[in-house]
Image (cartoon, grey):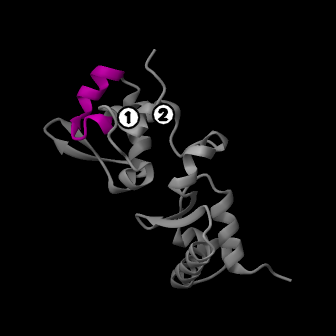
Amino acid sequence: MEPDKKRIIESALFISARSMALDELARLTGLAAPGFVKAMLEELRAEYEGRGSAVEIMEIDGRWLMRVKDAYAEKVKGFAQQAEVSRPALRTLAYIARHDGVMKSEVANKIGAQIYEDVRELAQSGFVKQVKAGRSKRLFLTDKFKQYFRTVQTEGQTQLEQKAPQQQ
């Protein structure tokens, strides 16, 4: 007997350490129409909300993920798997978060040349967008960053900066 396609989607979101696109989930389930996948995702989201689960299914920039609700995240964060972003890129992201709209060249001067690879990774992950500004580029946080990290200012630092490794 073939597993229920909705449960396959649920399992993929559960096991994945990253957000997933509708077309990716459609291929996984063999469903031709991403609209059917989206309907199943909405049903799953309603199921989790309806039973008062500590886990939620959400959409950010057209990609879907399963995560622990804020009320429980702090208590269980030590059990989390590796993030979507590498440690060096996380440090670069923390700097950009503190200086939204900063010039890429300024970040390179402060952190080092490796930021060019970090920024490429961050842009591919959808956390940072680059806007041409003369011969350099300005780096801005995206809505995905703001939703994913749920940034809150605390004593001049974002939550992300508090999680980033200290510069050696």
Residue pointed to by mark 2: 163
Image: 101 above or below 115:
below
Q: Is residue 53 left or right of residue 97?
A: right
The CA span between labels 1 and 2 is 9 Å
Disc marking residue 42: none
The N terminus appears in which quarter of the rendering? bottom right
Front: mark 1 or 2:
2
Residue 108 location (% of width, % of height): 30, 25
- Is residue 99 one of those drawn in magenta? yes
Report the magenta stretch's main SS: helix
Mark 1–mark 2 CB contact (< 8 Å): yes
SS class, disc 1 = helix
Q: Residues within 10 Å of mark 2 (few under 14, many from 20)?
A: few
Report the amino acid beneath label 1: Ala
| Quarter of the image where one finds residue 76 | top right
Q: Which stretch appears magenta?
A: 96-112
